[in-house]
Image (cartoon, grey):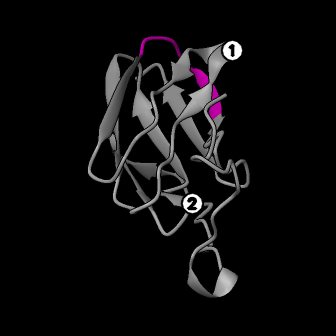
Amino acid sequence: MPSGGASGAMEMPAGGAVAPASTTPVHTDHVQITNFAFAPAEITVVAGTTVTWMNEDITQHDVFAPPVGLQSPVLNQNDSYTHTFSSPGTYRYICSIHPFMHGTVVVTSG
């Protein structure tokens, strides 16, 4: 797993608060990484869709779920990562640098 910088320490947003993640699935192919959260936290796409994650935080993040093929490089601010979901299913992922960050992609057959 990637480290959290030179010290490896977990960085928290100012005030120690983490943005609450929405649990309502959204039909989109874009996920923002902002305020130490994936937004939206759960998306729904049709098989064959390419999803893009964009890091809008000043802190490094990644998209990590090796068993399902998600393993982005470390994303700096304004970096993006894409992955095409070819099979229906529910794909859960985290930021391995900040494992309290969770997201889900639900892939339907159409």
Determine crowd level at label 2: few under 14, some 14-19, many 20+ residues with C-alpha closer than 10 A.
Answer: few
Q: Residue 48 sits in which quadrant?
A: top left
Q: Could you say which is closer to the camera, residue 105 or residue 35?
A: 35
Q: What residue is disc 2 on?
A: 24
Farthest bottom residue in view: 15
Q: Residue at x 66, y 34 (%)?
A: 92
How far is the residue under mark 2 from the one under mark 1?
24 Å
Nearer the viewer's eye, disc 2 or disc 1? 1
Q: Is residue 56 left or right of residue 105?
A: left
| Mark 2, secondary structure of its residue | loop
Q: Residue at x 60, y 66 (%)?
A: 21
- Which of the image's four quarters has the N terminus? top right
| Mark 1, secondary structure of its residue | helix
- The overriding secondary structure of the stretch rendered in magenta is strand
What stretch of residues is rendered in magenta?
A: 85-92
The answer to whether residue 101 is above or below residue 85 is below
The residue type indicated by label 1 comes to Pro
Q: Residue at x 29, y 43 (%)?
A: 79
The answer to whether residue 82 is above or below residue 31 is above
Closer to the N terminus: mark 2 or mark 1? 2
Q: What residue is disc 1 on?
A: 67
Farthest left residue in view: 78
Q: Could you say which is closer to the camera, residue 60 or residue 71?
A: 60
- Which of the image's four quarters has the C terminus? top left
Q: Residue 36 sits in which quadrant?
A: bottom right
* Spot occupied by residue 85 in the image (x, y as percentages of width and height): 43, 18
